Amino acid sequence: MATRSESDLKHIGTPRHSGRYPWGSGKNPQRSKSFRSYVNELKEQGLSEVEIAKGMGLNTKQLRDKVSMAYAEERAVNVTMATRLLEKGYSETAISQRMGVDTRTVRSWLDKEISDRANISATTALVLKDAVGSTGLIQIGVGVEQHLGISRPKLNTAVAMLQEEGYTVHTIYVEQAGTGKYTAIKVLAPPGTTKADVNKNRYDIKLPIEYYSEDGGRSYNSIEPIQSVSSKRIYVRYKEDGGADKDGMIELRRGVDDISLGGTPYAQVRIGVDDTHFMKGMAIHTNNIPDGYDIVYNVSKSKGEEVFKPLKSDDPDNPIGAALRQKKYTDANGNERLSAINIVGYKEGSGEEGSWNVWSRSISSQVLSKQTPKLAKTQLGLDLAIRKEEYDEIMALTNPAVKKAMLKKFSDECDSAAVHLSAAALPRQNTHVLLSFPSIKEDQVYAPNYDNGERVVLIRHPHGGIFEIPELTVNNSNKEAKAVIGNSRDAIGIHPKTASQLSGADFDGDAVIVIPNKNRNIQIAPQLKALKDFDPRSAYRDLPTGEKPLDARGKGIEMGKISNLITDMTIRGASHDEIARAVKHSMVVIDAEKHKLNYKQSAIDNNIAELKKKYQGSERSGASTIISKASAEKRINERREGRTVVDTATGKKRKIYIDPSTGEKLYEPTGRTYLKRKPIKDPITGKKKYYELDPVTGKKKYYDEEGSILPRKTKTTRMAEEKDAFKLSSGTRMEDIYAEHANNLKGMANKARLDMINTKDRPYNPSARTTYAQEVTALKSALALAYRNKPLERQAQLLTNKIVAAKRRANPDMDPDHLKKAKNQALEEARARYNARKPKIQITDRQWEAIQAGALSPSALEKILENADPTTFVPRAMPKQYKGMSPARTNRAKSLLSLGHTPAEVAEALGVSVTTIHNVING
């Protein structure tokens, strides 16, 4: 049979345009019906769809599209014939006899509504052709069919029809703002368009049905022109007047509408001044405003110095340069007006009370590695216990599809955790924003979320060492703080001198971790004498003549270097005097851009080169311990997920994504390259130039004509690429604790992936589909709604890339921090413009019954769970006996209790009642 099939298929070629002869040529040209009949005949001979497609030089999708297209063409011919016969006076019975079909078929051909439905693909092809004609490039990826109101197969057939006419289809990849990953965009283009053409014109890609106006009557970032206040309304409290004690705090007169914070007692804000400048800081309401003013701006600068920042003239879309939400208020006449208050952050509630205590409650390796190995081992062990508990609960899930979905999520989280190396939080640890109240004693803190009299430590990230961790006594009776922030959810008040110990913190939005320290788990030390009263701004304020100040990008690079050095020195046991030198230099670097400090002289004075040589191997070396190496960037040749393998049993190729023996993710190289040319520096502007324009032809003439062909690279991290974390360790005890933790996480991730691929799907049950027909329809409708967002999100990513590219051209030296803000800002606006908001499917009890009964195919269920709210299906998939405390959670509770934590602390850590914990104790 195999030999005959290969002979039969040898010269078939691709219908219409390949093979020995074009499809439809010759004395008796083949018709669509002949093609379909031929495919059916081959199937009857025992050939699989894959074998038929291969013999025709197609893949199975192309074959199906062509069969669908042939059916559509065949039906169109039959409808035309039946209609003509009807017009000639033939009855339906006579037409059926003439055309050799039954009367029901004739009736369906003559039914206009049925015919219209059958001709959807042809109609869609016309719509797509028209869209390409008007915009040039259009999206045809998953979800576009939802906007066209058709099924995916119908869209595929329509695209195949256009490909027969010469239209081209290409897939390009666009970097996602924020994640660094890539979004695939499938594009339909006019005949003759190459993939290079599509990449070059990627910002012209549109949806077939466009919902978006390019300008929309507003700027890309949806920021209206900044509403400024007059500088005459602002009382600047300079250093000489005590402004340094509240540096960064902005005090607002109560009851003034255009500067009101609304219902929040404090917020991180930006306020325009005189339409030319702005001020930044933490804003609070107070009654202690000098007469004739509405605002007090506290600064550490002296009189005569510029205290306001200039609005950016090179970025009119966002002259303040931060992610902002603008407030509105209603004036005395009932008109809505734009407030002068701009709150930092895009998400609703960010930058206001309650937004700091939702920050991660884990402990970073930068903090914990400076503590004792015992504490590190304990907290990392708790982190593993939490993950083991989660893994056990996932493995207990009763629905295989839910189990697979949760195992995938769990494995990805373990991979990420192995890179970031964060540990479990200590009981009642939380993040708070700092506010200054000089009436508080230096050894006290106003912290309404903690008990009067208890001792807490404050930790700022990053910090140089335990000598920058103050331990304070809670005093919630301070009248000044109580009047301003009351029972705040996530703000604390400290004396201004305490901030100087917190690695130079100020009060413009700096936050700290607050941890009760009753058991002295957190080690502290007195502030180093060398750092007391050290003022980098006065010590290194003079730059040599002609020396350019450090720019934002340079500051980021230098801060990365010195931060890694301090971490490596601490882990390797450097003396406090040595660490003080490095910390002093870091204080200079962090202010070098803003105050034009001579950071190079600081490096010489503090002999940073000698410290690098001693603790990092050489003057030019970088990270040398696992803590600083783990998340360090590593560039590798570009790759894609999955690896093509040959099935030894069938000899067929297939793609696998997980190694079936180890559980590791698999990749294969893309092989993509790019042309790199060498630039020259313009002697006038000092900027790099790659070409000059020919004065006659106007064409580009590159200085480096040939260039170099190099492989495209992708970013990853050193830990992500290292199978054994111990290879990143220099051998210290602390590093080995972290290396073991990282390897445990990697092992957990691999085990979860093996469990995922070895979990068998629940069989599809056709009778259950009938029983739960209404629920199946509802779930598929909800999935269609979720898929409708996909092309909108792709358009938003395209627009984001376009905006960010323009900003980078205008400001090529943009530092990573500002670039990240620009991306987030552009993405939020682009999503708003396209209304790209992914709705989460909410699964009901009855729908869960349908899922459990097998009413959905495994592939359909997988897609639904990917787009569903986990809280609506994970609890339902848990065994009944796990509804309270699972065995893993019970073990973790006992572990925490054995470490000396109170039942109340354990209950809070596990999110259960104190009664539940007492049951564990007495169980």
Image (cartoon, helix red, strand yellow):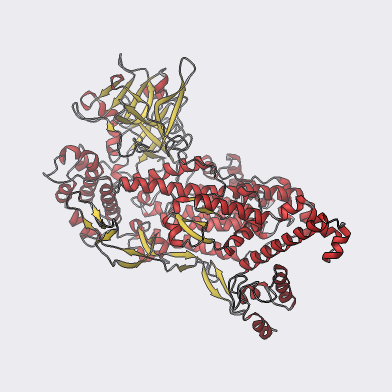
Q: Note whether residue 481 is visible.
A: yes
Q: Report whether 602 appears left or right of 369.
A: left
Between residue 763 and residue 91, name the one nearer to us: 91
Between residue 688 and residue 597, name the one nearer to us: 688
Please name the residue shown 30% across and 39% down the image. 314
- Residue 667's place in the image compared with 19, above or below, is above
- Residue 676's place in the image compared with 916, above or below, is below
Q: Report whether 753 appears left or right of 251.
A: right
The quadrant holding residue 301 is top left
Please name the residue shown 30% across and 14% down the image. 292
Q: Report whether 765 appears left or right of 626.
A: right
- Residue 56's place in the image compared with 292, above or below, is below
Percent from the top left, x then y, of residue 226?
Answer: 37, 29
The quadrant holding residue 274 is top left
Residue, far bottom: 3
Between residue 801 and residue 424, name the one nearer to us: 801
Percent from the top left, x then y, of residue 189?
Answer: 51, 57
Percent from the top left, x then y, of residue 410?
Answer: 54, 56
Q: Quadrant of the N terminus?
A: bottom right
Q: Report whether 338 appears left or right of 23.
A: left
Residue, far front: 88
Q: How many marks?
A: 0
Percent from the top left, x then y, of residue 730?
Answer: 31, 63
Q: Note whether residue 181 is visible.
A: no
